[in-house]
Image (spheres, rainbow, N blue to C red):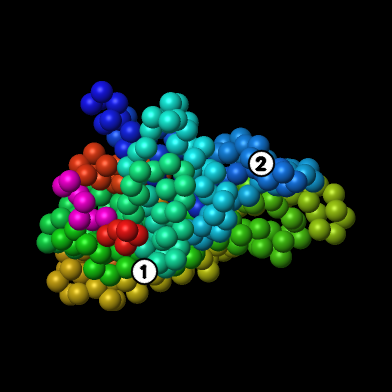
């Protein structure tokens, strides 16, 4: 019996782009896009995750593929609850049996109202107790930084909807900045650029693929090229254009600048002792945006600080929250205190 009790606490990284679920003692069991496909008449859910993501931009009239989280916050509470419930059921087949403790990650800039919405979603989806941890804190723990020591650790977590920059020391966040410029905004910038420069309409999925294959933040030793398909805005017919990595760099320049700017601003507000520590230890990049080629170089170039990319940037946040599930008593102090009861 004791065994069945242990295996059900979970940590959820409820991300704008992807949702990951970590189950105590078993690791990351769910890693799927945060997308829900609905039947608009009946509001019933047709697909969640990978299957729903394939439908974005390809749905007929009665079906809509939505992303319930935008800019790191819940835009559609009902869809978020359904999605959470779906992912939890995937993990816990015997539904009636599981009332897990849940730790959910939220961006550090969320308001009390948004935080309550996240908790509510957790309780509605079947959580027995729902705790909240701030994303940069989870990312730092997941990236293996010594967050409890009296040294400054700086983490830059670039997700789908938000970029979180935080300096952490003694198990708490000292300075933090959350900007709503992240992966999604890079995609939108690429869409806008292709429209303006090539009068070509792209879907958001294509833009995301271009970002992954051609996107970069700093000149590359070998620049790349690729063909991009979209719809010609003049003739209305499909057309192919050849695009190079320097061009995509220009397309996302403004967004890159605001990410780098957030890092600078945070360094500027950091107490001098901690700033000295960061000079030694460097800045750690996590989140999907950390995979953008040359972003580490770019930040190093503009701040003069050493920059490291976390070992597996996509799972840093969920692994950090997962560690809090595993060592709940030891790490309880990093969780946001429960104001609900």
Q: Which mark is residue 44?
A: 2
2 or 1: tag closer to the N-terminus:
2
Relative image position of residue 133 (x, y in whole percent): 32, 55
Return the residue nearer the eye: 13 or 212. 13
Residue 24 marker: none
Magenta-span inclusion, residue 332: yes
Against 93, residue 294 (above or below) is: below
Q: Residue furthest left?
A: 150
Q: Nearer the viewer, residue 316 or 106?
A: 106
**In magenta segment, residue 19:** no
Measured from the top left, where is residue 243 in percent x and y?
65, 52
Q: Where is residue 276 drawn, in percent x and y?
A: 17, 68
Q: Position of residue 88 (x, y in %)?
A: 45, 36
As measured in the structure, the alpha-carbon distance from the residue carrying label 2 to the one carrying label 1 is 38 Å
The quarter of the displayed image where residue 70 is located: bottom right
Local SS, label 2: loop
Q: Which residue is mark 1?
A: 177
Q: Is residue 339 something that shows in the picture? A: yes
Q: Secondary structure at mark 1?
A: strand
In this view of the protein, which residue sits in the foreground, 32 or 73?
73
Query: Mark 1: few, some, or many residues within 10 Å (few <14, many ≥20)?
Result: some
Looking at the rendering, which quadrant does residue 305 occupy? bottom left
Identity of the residue drawn at 47% across and 51% down:
121
Magenta span: 329-335
Majority secondary structure of magenta residues: helix
Residue lying at the far right of the rendered structure = 235
Instruction: Give the answer, above or below, for where 301 lies relative to 287.
Output: below
**Residue occupying the point 27% across, 42% down:** 325
Q: Residue at x 32, y 52 (%)?
A: 131
């Amino acid at each position: 019996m004791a065994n069945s009790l242990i295996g059900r606490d979970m940590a959820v990284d409820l991300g704008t782009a992807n949702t990951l679920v970590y189950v105590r003692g078993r690791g990351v069991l769910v890693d799927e896009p945060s997308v829900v496909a609905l039947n608009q008449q009946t509001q019933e859910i047709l697909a969640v995750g990978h299957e729903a993501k394939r439908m974005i931009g390809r749905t007929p009239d009665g079906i809509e593929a939505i992303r319930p989280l935008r800019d790191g916050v819940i835009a559609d509470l009902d869809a978020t609850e359904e999605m959470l419930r779906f992912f939890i059921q995937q993990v816990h087949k015997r539904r009636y049996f599981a009332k897990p403790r849940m730790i959910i990650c939220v961006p550090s800039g969320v308001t009390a109202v948004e935080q309550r919405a996240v908790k509510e979603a957790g309780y509605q989806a079947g959580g027995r107790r729902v705790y909240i941890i701030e994303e940069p804190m989870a990312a730092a723990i997941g990236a293996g930084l010594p967050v409890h020591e009296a040294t400054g650790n700086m983490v830059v977590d670039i997700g789908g909807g938000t970029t979180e920059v935080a300096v952490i020391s003694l198990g708490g966040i000292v300075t933090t900045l959350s900007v709503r410029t992240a992966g999604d905004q890079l995609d939108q910038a690429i869409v806008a650029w292709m429209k303006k420069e090539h009068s070509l309409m792209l879907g958001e999925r294509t833009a995301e693929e271009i970002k992954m294959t051609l996107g970069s933040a700093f000149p590359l030793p070998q620049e790349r090229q690729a063909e991009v398909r979209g719809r010609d805005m003049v003739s209305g017919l499909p057309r192919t254009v050849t695009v190079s990595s320097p061009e995509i760099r220009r397309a996302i320049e403004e967004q890159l600048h605001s990410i780098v700017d957030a890092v600078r601003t945070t360094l500027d507000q950091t107490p001098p002792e901690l700033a000295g520590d960061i000079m030694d230890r460097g800045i750690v990049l996590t989140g999907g945006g950390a995979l953008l080629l040359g972003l580490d170089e770019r930040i190093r170039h503009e701040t003069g600080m050493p920059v490291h990319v976390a070992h597996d940037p996509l799972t840093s946040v969920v692994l950090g929250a997962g560690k809090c599930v595993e060592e709940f008593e030891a790490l309880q102090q990093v969780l946001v205190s429960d104001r609900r009861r």
